[in-house]
Amino acid sequence: MSVGADLMARSDQVFIQTYSRFPAMMVRGEGCRLWDADGKEYLDFLSGIAVCALGHCHPEVTRAICEQAGKLVHVSNLFYTEPQTELARLLTQHSFADRVFLANSGAEANEAALKLARIHSGPDRYEVISLTGSFHGRTLATVAATGQPKFHEGFEPLPQGFVHAEFGDLRHLEGLISDRTCAIFCEPLQGESGVRPLDRVYLQKIRELCDRHDLLLIFDEVQTGMGRTGTLFAYEQLGVIPDIMTLAKALGNGLPIGAMLTSDKIAAAFSVGSHASTFGGNPVAAAAGVVVLKTMLADGFFDGVRAKEHLLTQGLQRTARRFPGIASGTRGLGLIQGLVLTPAGIERGQEIVNRLFERGVLINFAGGRVLRFIPPLIVEPEDIGMLIEALTAVLEELQ
Ligand code: PLP
């Protein structure tokens, strides 16, 4: 048995089986490459599910982590620490927000947002409208907010106060607004359910509805935020400013950290004791976040992302044209791109992913309908060329 197979067999014996994993025991990463325990190299167009935006083991991030770990790892939020202050300062300086709450994950950042929306709106207005197809996390409240029944099944009764509007249907959304509603909660682009960008005008109309009915607009930018869509936050290119925004994933480039951002006025609804986290804003994770932000804010970073977006979309569109039986087109923003599959392609979706894995290329099948490409934002043009070549070879095999 190979080193990797032995480790995987032992792992499967001790873990509660909640994950369907690729058969690889990863041991090392650098930039857009990963290596498994048997020495096989992988080209990574998954980034740990849109997390390692600066690539694996980015030297500056690693240096900041090691330096901070040598100084102070944890003290809790009973004390002030420098990295989290700097991180919050940078986040507020470069977004609509004045204030930040730091958490450890996307679901936790969303929980903070939901609690803030409720307490801000008073006891009678507690209902949150989210969209079908959305994904907001795996805690009970974020599962309830998630607009996909498959994530609800078996966990009922779910927390009350969540209703789902049909994706893209403004009239349906408007019909759901009542005296109980406190917020509209959505991702500017639905990542998990198949790379589905929300139309600009639709989002602008949602903003108008929020203003008209005095509702908070919460953007879940856990996946789209931190550069993934070609700007630091997706809202910047949509002409819509949310009242609350959540972040996680790429914020720590792999260290667990989440954030909930809002204005002074809305933040005032929380007071001492309203919400808390033992680990939130942990100095090591926050030190990583500071480097991530400074790197992305450096001159030219997003020009590079957009140039790579162009290359990737061109390559994927060529592929879609070449294999019309399997793919019908592409969609996405920045470096979150999807190859939309035809019904025949959908049947082979997981097989395409698995065959690419065999060839040492990592992607995934999002929402059971789209091949999702979320490489590190520092991906090289040659890597994009290699991806398209491998994808073409796999689709040729399947034809
Ligand atoms: N929100 C969105 C849009 C996500 O894509 C995810 C994870 O995929 C989450 C929330 C949950 O984040 P986490 O897994 O860090 O709790």
Image: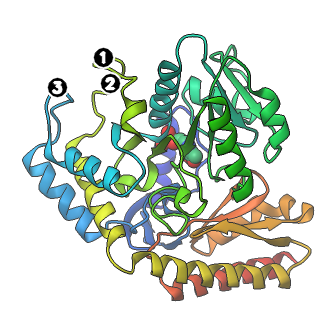
Which residue is found at the position 45% from the left and 33% from the top? 108
Say above or below: 116 vs 319.
Answer: above
Name the kind of residue labelled 3 in the image: Leu
Residue located farthest toward the top when viewing the structure as drawn: 123
Label 3, secondary structure: give it.
loop
- Closer mark to the observer between disc 1 and disc 2: 1
* Relative depth, front residue between 114 and 38: 114
- Under mark 1, the amino acid is Gly
Q: Which of marks 3 and 2 is nearer the N terminus?
A: 3
Q: Do the residues labelled 3 and 2 touch (CB within 8 Å)?
A: no
For marks 1 and 2, give the CA distance. Answer: 7 Å
**What's under tag 2, amino acid-wise?**
Ala
The mark nearer the N terminus, 3 or 1, is: 3
Q: Which label belongs to residue 78?
A: 3
Residue 122 shows up from this direction: yes
Ligand 1 lies under 8 Å from the Cβ of mark 3: no
Quick check: is the Cβ at mark 1 less than 8 Å away from ligand 1? no
Identify the residue under disc 1.
273
| Of labels 3 and 1, the one closer to you | 1
Residue 236 horizontal/vertical position (percent): 52, 60
User: What's the CA distance linking mark 3 and mark 1?
Assistant: 12 Å
Q: How far apart are marks 3 and 2 (CA)?
A: 10 Å
Q: Mark 2 points at which residue?
A: 276
- Residue 174: x and y in percent read 79, 34
- Reply above or below: 132 against 187: above
Q: How crowded is mark 3: few (under 14 residues within 10 Å), some or many (20 or more)?
A: few
Front in this rendered view, residue 14 or 1: 14
Q: Do the residues labelled 1 and 2 touch (CB within 8 Å)?
A: yes
Q: Tell me residue 19's x, y (percent).
A: 58, 42
Residue drawn at x 36%, y 26% as measured from the top left:
268
